[in-house]
Amino acid sequence: MHSAWRFHRALHRFSGGRFLWTPSNERGWGALHLTTVGRRTGRPRGVIIGYLEDGPRLVAIAMNGWEEGHPAWWLNLETHPDAVVRLPGQPPRHVRARLAAGDERERLWARWRAVDPRLDGYAGRRSTQTPVVVLEPAG
């Protein structure tokens, strides 16, 4: 999984964002470019992640390739929740991240499960609950 995402990042960089930076479509999900602030460095950090649309919000799963621990982008957002999202053909969006909890988390997890029915099996490999991250319009 990590190798696949490294390949996606390299292809994104090489193509200037023309590949693998897609809006949500008939697959049920899309890929976006997220810029966070590094929790240790304070410097901008970019990553490509999958997302679902939920009204004006974008929803991601902090899965770290289904391995233990959380991905750096989520750890950065926990420290600095303000970020920038880029989608093709749209101006950058300033967002604020938060963790979905309770009924909202269950509803959003079910939406992700509808996209990939194997989701519960993948998540079961981890000893901790996989964070469901909501990116809301800032301001």
Image (tube, grey):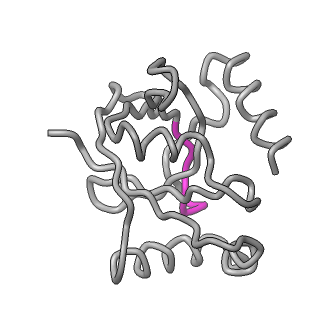
Quadrant into which the C terminus falls? top left
Residue 59 sits above or below residue 96 on the image: below
Residue 91 in the image: above or below residue 107: above
Residue 128 locus on image (x, y percent)? 62, 71
Residue 29 is inside the magenta segment: yes
Which corner quadrant of the image does residue 138 belong to?
A: top left
Please name the residue shown 42% across and 28% down the image: 89
Q: Residue at x 35, y 48 (%)?
A: 97
Q: Provide residue 106's location: percent of width, then percent of height.
A: 43, 81
The residue sitting at 33% across, 25% down in the picture is: 91
Q: Is residue 58 found left or right of 123 in the rendered image?
A: left
Residues shaded magenta = 26-32
In x, y percent, where is residue 47? 59, 33
Extreme-front residue of the structure: 40
- What percent of the width, then of the height, locates residue 39? 48, 32
User: In the shown orientation, is residue 121 left or right of residue 71?
Assistant: right
> In terms of depth relative to the viewer, which is nearer, 82 or 107?
82
Left or right of 4? Residue 37 is left
Q: Is residue 75 magenta?
A: no
Q: Is residue 102 above or below residue 138?
A: below
Q: Residue furthest left?
A: 139
**How many numbered callouts?**
0
